[in-house]
Image: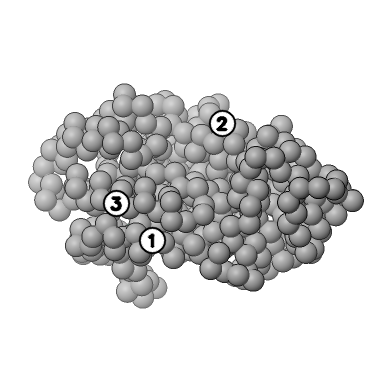
Amino acid sequence: MLHGLRQLATPLADGGMRVVADAWVAFEEGRVAAVGSGTPPAGGERIDADGMVAIPGFVDSHTHAVFGRSRADELERRVRGESYASIAASGGGILASVADLRRRSEDELVELARPRLLAMLASGTTTAEVKSGYGLSLDDELKTLRAIERLRSLVSLELVPTFLGAHAVPPEFLADRAGYVRLLAREMLPAVADQGLARFCDVFCDRGAFTLEEAETVLSAARDLGLGLKVHADEFENLGATEMAVRLGAASADHLLRVGESGIRALAGSRTVATLLPGTALFLGLPYAPARRLLEAGATLALATDFNPGSCPCASMATVWTLASCGMGVPLDDALRALTLGGARALGLQDEVGCVAPGRRADLSLFDVADYREIPYFFGENRCAGVVRGGSVVWSRSSPQS
Ligand code: NIG
Ligand code: FE
């Protein structure tokens, strides 16, 4: 039982919102049993929320949290006018992180990623997807996915692993792209699936990454192996990746900075979630994705961080909320839905997490604010005061090591 909440705000599965003043939430076996207002029923283990405001734990459905060093050097270069693409072409970008990760041990990757994931938890995220994609060889991708597997038992947030072997063509295959696509489809994916190391397969389908045809080869192989699909689509150039994602039944199409009318229509008429990553647009100085048009067309939105060393080193979902609302014009309640239930849907967890309602997992984040709308309002500040997972406090500002 969590009691003493100044307010509970949650999207509901039927499309509505529930805002309860002076709220309590009763738990049973790690799940929500009831939500009420006023004097809570007696009995059971009690957690005093001390006047905090609760929302469902954020579901960050797109991160690249396992990498080696930061690439802060590239920030200076971009600010001085070099583009993300030209930095990548001159030895920086994704391939710089690949060279770095290949030199590191699995233990080191675990130690580097652990505080990053803890920072996510401490800013109110209770579920995070984590992609591989800086290894790009069988051994280095498996090493990354094993690190994610180990992190699952070391941190208190739920991790969902995604195989992103098709993040870039590795240097040793630059003259033989088809050879790398074959390696992905015939060796890497079967090994990943066989070892149960990923729930999804993602492909970066864009200029400078993989073509539509290459992406479809990889995604079809992944689907045949029983993996869910995701696509980095229409980030820099519109190659038709969003329409392909929908056609293949992908769980989500992500980025969408350059999605056009036909991509919007395809998403709106499908179960594929439109995952928007406004931190990346901000950090790369690119125009935001057309969030309002997607919403008005009826697409299901998710909002996520894209936390990664190159294009978005921000792991704060509250900051993403501010960017979504202030930068893309997403109404606050629609943004909260996209940050929680939308992310859950993009991970196939829509019946488990993402809203506070009877039967759902009892994953909530508590904020030191007077109203839930102050979470995106006081931007740049982490107001998260506590995190509850499965009905137990797993992080609190007063004892941060817990
Ligand atoms: O989602 N777009 C491709 N991949 C990442 C960037 C990764 C990097 O720069 O290291 C993204 O933005
Ligand atoms: Fe990404």
Task: Give the residue at x 50% y 48%.
Answer: 158
Disc 2, SS: helix
Q: In this view, does 187 lie to the left or right of 161?
A: left
Name the image quarter holding residue 366.
bottom right
Mark before the other along the chain sequence, 2 or 3: 3
Q: Residue at x 13, y 47 (%)?
A: 173
- Given the image, on which type of amino acid does mark 1 rest? Ala
Residue pointed to by mark 2: 268
Task: Judge whether residue 273 can be spotted in this image.
Answer: no
Q: Does the residue labelled 2 lie within 8 Å of ligand 2?
A: no
- Of discs 1 and 2, which sits in the foreground? 1
x and y, in percent, of residue 321 in the image: 61, 56
Left or right: 55 as drawn, with respect to 134: right
The residue under the point 76% across, 48% down is: 44
Query: Helix, strand, or loop for circle 3?
Result: helix
The tally of labels here is 3
Q: From the image, tell me which residue sits under label 3.
A: 144
The residue singled out by tag 1 in the image is 113
Tag 2 near tag 3, CB within 8 Å: no
Q: Which amino acid does label 2 sit on?
A: Ala
Instruction: Look at 25% across and 47% down and name the residue there.
Output: 141
Considering the image in quadrants, where does the C terminus appear?
Answer: bottom right
Q: Quadrant of residue 220?
A: top left
Badge 3 crowding class, 10 Å Cα cut-off, few under 14, some 14 to 19, many 20 or more, is many
Q: 211 above or below 82? A: above
In the image, residue 308 above or below residue 141: below
Which of the 4 image quadrants contains residue 368?
bottom right
Q: Residue 93 at what x, y percent from top left?
A: 28, 61
